[in-house]
Image (spheres, rainbow, N blue to C red):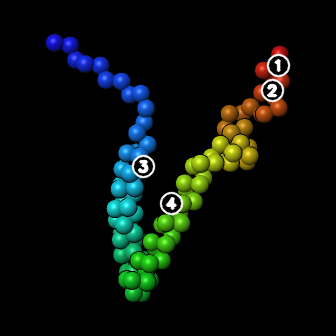
Amino acid sequence: MPMPTILADAINLPLVAGLGLITIGPLTLLVTAIESLVFRLYLKTGFRIVVKRVLIANVISTLAGGLLLMFQDVVIHGTGIADRATGVHVADAGVQGCV
């Protein structure tokens, strides 16, 4: 008996978003706990103070990374990183395309 064909027609956005939030919460808490333990031992301060500051830093870092991911094309092309990586200048690429 042949196997049935399964086609993926669309992404279930609520499912992906929900599972992403379910995953990122525990991972952030785990990373925060490990970093807090290291900083507490290194700085010799209270655990609650370190946890609060590390958690705030991790949340800000995650939000900044999300914004950078949303605008990565603008950032990469605006800084000229893409031009240096490929060795093709934007002006040269336009001329080559017209010829």
Q: Earlier in the sequence, mark 1 or mark 4?
A: 4
Residue at 36% x, 66% y is: 29
Tag 2–tag 1 contact (CB < 8 Å): yes
Q: Earlier in the sequence, mark 3 or mark 4?
A: 3
89 left or right of 15 in image: right
Q: Which residue is mark 3?
A: 17
Which amino acid type corresponds to the residue marked 1 in the rendered image?
A: Cys
Tag 4–tag 2 contact (CB < 8 Å): no
Q: Position of residue 60 (x, y in %)?
A: 53, 66
Q: Position of residue 69 (x, y in %)?
A: 57, 49
In three-dimensional space, the C-alpha distance between marks 3 and 2, rounded to whole angstroms, equals 39 Å
Q: Is residue 38 visible?
A: no
Residue at 74% x, 46% y is: 78
Residue at 68% x, 33% y is: 86
Residue at far left of view? 1
* Front label number (1 vs 3): 3
Return the residue nearer the eye: 23 or 30.
Answer: 23
Residue 3's place in the image compared with 9, above or below, is above
